[in-house]
Image: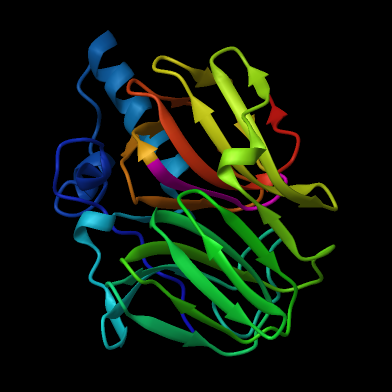
Amino acid sequence: MTTMPHSPDSENDDLSPLLSEPFASAWDAPVAPGPLGERLGARLQRSLDAERGMVTVRRRSHTPEALGDGAQGRWLYRAPAGRPLRPGEPRAALVIELQAGAEVALPAGGVREFLVMRGDAQLHAADGVDTLGLRDFLLLPAGHAVRLASQDGAHVFVREADGDAPARTLVRDVEAGWPEFAPGIRRRVLWTAAGQASLLYRADPGASVPVHSHGHDEECLMVQGELFLDDLLLQQGDYQLAPAGTGHRITETDTGVILYAHGDLDLQFT
């Protein structure tokens, strides 16, 4: 399996198009003299540094893969074969899109997380059937073969990882609440082990998170709204994986946002 490539968009909502050819070669030329040129050069260099090693997938420009009759998958990440995973790195992540009445079978694999992003879905496993609604979350330990179905249609985020899960975990959106985390930000811990966690964040318009680094790989999936991660504007359905050892200078939302994140339980502010 190969790593999903970075997927810059042609829209003018971030600097990604300026970081590829033919523009990239221009950054080797001397920056125009003066304060403005110096600031622009510094900003572009910071953007290049921040982008290095990160994986960004745009929903609106990413072609889905057919998984069966009425089912398709949008691959967000597949870890490269032949090397150990980084701390917190997923084995794979995708969004499965089911039309009404469709289903897809997933063979036994690693630890799997399921988060409903649209509609409702039924998850059939050896220990029974769970009906999941919007923003419901289910964690299954490794070794479970499942059948994912939907009567009315659904989009379901699926994350697979190595290692052991503490236990089967079901978190219902209507029951979980939104505990306060920081000014303008609420956070729901879905599960946690060994310093890493899966979480849902709910941020008000104008909310921001200070500069921080990542002890584990950090994944961000936009469930609702828009979020700036440095010079990238992520919109609903977009995904970014920032490897362990990287960091974010800017994390803020103008619109308000609900996002899924997997990474450090305690953010490492710098």
First to last magenta residue range = 215-223
Residue displayed at 59% across by 44% down: 246
Indicate left or right for 37 with 198 as reference.
left
The secondary structure that dominates the magenta segment is strand
Q: Nearer the viewer, residue 180 or 40?
A: 180
Residue displayed at 33% across by 80% down: 102
* Residue 129 sits in quarter: bottom right
Q: Nearer the viewer, residue 148 or 185?
A: 148
Indicate left or right for 91 with 68 as reference.
right
Q: Nearer the viewer, residue 38 or 245?
A: 245
In the rendered image of this protein, does residue 248 appear above or below residue 10?
above
User: According to the image, what is the colour scheme of the structure?
Assistant: rainbow
Q: Nearer the viewer, residue 197 or 96?
A: 96
Residue 222 falls inside the magenta stretch: yes
Residue displayed at 62% across by 29% down: 178
Residue 155 falls inside the magenta stretch: no
The spot of residue 218 in percent (x, y) is 59, 48
In the rendered image of this protein, does residue 270 appear above or below residue 58?
above
Q: Residue furthest top?
A: 35
The spot of residue 61 in percent (x, y) is 20, 59
* Residue 210 sits in quarter: top right
Q: How many marks?
A: 0
The spot of residue 32 in percent (x, y) is 20, 22
The spot of residue 166 in percent (x, y) is 84, 62
